[in-house]
Image (cartoon, rainbow, N blue to C red):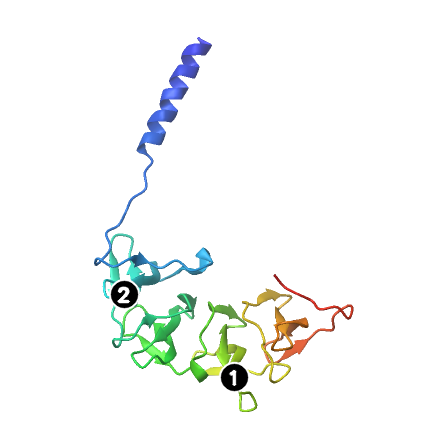
Amino acid sequence: MRKIMIFLLFFLCIGFLSKAQINLFDNPDTGNGMKVATTAKNSYVTINNKLYFSYKNASMKSQLAEFDGTNITLISNLDAGSGVYDMQPVSFNNKVYFGYSNESNVVQLGEYDGTNAINLYTVPDNGVNTNGFVFNSKLYWVGYYNTPEDIYSYPHLMEFNGASVQVIDNPVPGNVGTTQTPVEFNSKLYFPFRTSTQGVGQKLAVFDGASTTLLTNPDVSQWEVE
């Protein structure tokens, strides 16, 4: 009897597994399809019960793609530029935001509400370089920006309040800053900050929603971040 039960259980399991399958949805064109970010969790977002992600089309341009559970639809780019650029789609205020590179290679912040055409916001110095994240009801990312006292563009924290983009001043001028996405801790943002152009002498930086402060290292050694 025990052998019969094991035998039946085995075939029940085989039958269940045979029904489980992965469904493939047709791409809307002959392009390369969905672009996956370095951090996979930042590759797609959902708003209004639809999935959005960056899609490499047949012309090798990146478009915002919309998936309703059945079909994939490509959202028209505004021009012949590269399209969705660097910043993967992120959800903020029930809209999708992303970096957008136009035909003049000017990078702007793109906004899509799920219905109307893509709306663009000016970003100082083309500063869209990392994935966005929401903090204190505002959208943030790290982007390169050339301040008046600097010869080169250095990474700065960028802030979007729903109407315009502003650059958060680095705590020390004329430095390299950070290219890593900050992490939220105790209602503040923390991130490693390089205090020289040689990429050494790093300190922990904290942003409280208004300004960035460098914390004192516990010793005189260089604090490196992998």
Q: What is the quadrant of residue 51 in the picture? A: bottom left
Give the distance between the C-alpha atoms of the residues marked 1 and 2, in whole angstroms. Answer: 30 Å
Q: Position of residue 23 (x, y in %)?
A: 29, 44
Q: Is residue 13 above or below residue 200?
A: above
Residue under label 2: 60
Q: Earlier in the sequence, mark 1 or mark 2?
A: 2
Question: Could you tell me which residue is drawn at 57 percent across and 90 percent down?
Answer: 149
Q: Is residue 95 above or below residue 69?
A: below
Q: Is residue 126 above or below residue 68?
A: below
Using the image as rendered, state which of residue 157 and residue 173 is in the foreground.
Answer: 173
Using the image as rendered, state which of residue 49 and residue 167 is in the foreground.
Answer: 167
Pair 1/2: label in front: 1
Residue under label 1: 152
User: What kind of element bears circle 1?
Assistant: loop
Given the image, on which type of amino acid does mark 2 rest? Met
Given the image, on which type of amino acid does mark 1 rest? Tyr
Q: What is the quadrant of residue 105 in the picture? A: bottom left
User: What kind of element bears circle 2?
Assistant: loop
The numbered mark at residue 109 is none
Q: Is residue 73 visible?
A: yes
Question: Could you tell me which residue is drawn at 43 percent across and 16 percent down?
Answer: 6
Q: Please state the total of marks drawn on the protein image.
A: 2
Q: Position of residue 159 (x, y in %)?
A: 50, 78
- Other-residue count near label 2 (Cα within 10 Å), few / some / many at <14 / 14–19 / ≥20: few
Question: Could you tell me which residue is drawn at 32 percent across and 30 percent down?
Answer: 18
